[in-house]
Amino acid sequence: MIVHGNRFTIRPGVPPEQLEEALESLRNQGRTIPAVRSFVVGRDHGGEFEWGATFVLDDLDGYWEYLTHPAHRNTDRVGLPIVDRFDSFDITDDDDPQIAEKIAALHQRRYDADPELTRLVSDLGEYNGSAAPGPHGKA
C-alpha cells in the first residue's frame, strides 16, 4: 500500500473561490480515480503548510493510474498556478528497497510526457518531496 500526500501553501491574494475550486478538484480525484482506496483533503495542522491531501493506493500500477487520470490533470491545471510552496510525500509498507526510486521514476515519466505540467511545476515557489526535484532539477 502507498499513501501519497501533498502539503501546500497558497500564494498571497488568491481569491477564496479559486482556492475552493482547487480543493474540490482534489476531492474529485478521490471520488473518481478508481485506484484511490481512500482520501482526505483539508487543513494541514502541526506544520508550516496550510492545506494537505492524502490518497491511498494499492501499488505502483495504481499510483500511475492516479498520476495520469484526467481528474488529477485537472487539479494540476487549476491548483498548481495558485500554490506557492508544495511538498509531496509517500508512506508505504512495500519492502522493496528501490520503491522510492520507482515512485520518483513515475513522476519523471509524467513530466517527460507533459510539457505543460513541467511548466506548472517549474513555476512553484518551492517544491520538495517524493517527486522532487521535479522538472529541470528544481527543488
Image: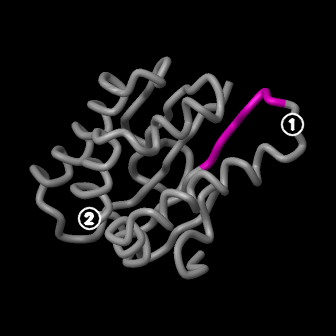
Seen in the picture, residue 124 relative to 68 is either above or below; the reply is below
Residue that carries the numbered disc 1 in the rendered image:
96
Q: Which mark, residue 15?
A: none
Residue that carries the numbered disc 2 in the rendered image:
82
- Say which quarter of the image contains residue 107: bottom right
Position of residue 56 measured from the top left corner of the image (x, y, whole percent): 55, 26
Q: Counting residues from the N terminus, which is met first, the one under dot 1 or under dot 2?
A: 2
Q: Secondary structure of the magenta portion, mostly?
A: strand
Which residue appears at 46% of the width and 24% of the height? 36
**Closer to viewer: mark 1 or mark 2:** 1
Give the left or right position of residue 94, taking residue 21 as reference.
right
The amino acid on which the numbered mark 1 sits, given as a three-letter code, is Asp
In front here: 113 or 21?
113
Mark 1 secondary-structure assignment: loop
Give the left or right position of residue 32, taking residue 46 as reference.
left
Which residue appears at 67% of the width and 48% of the height? 103
The reply to whether the magenta stretch includes residue 90 is yes
Q: Which residues are magenta?
A: 89-94
**How many other residues sit within 10 Å of disc 2, few (<14), some (14-19) or many (≥20)?**
many
- Label 1, label 2: how many angstroms apart (C-alpha)? 35 Å
Position of residue 57 measured from the top left corner of the image (x, y, whole percent): 57, 26
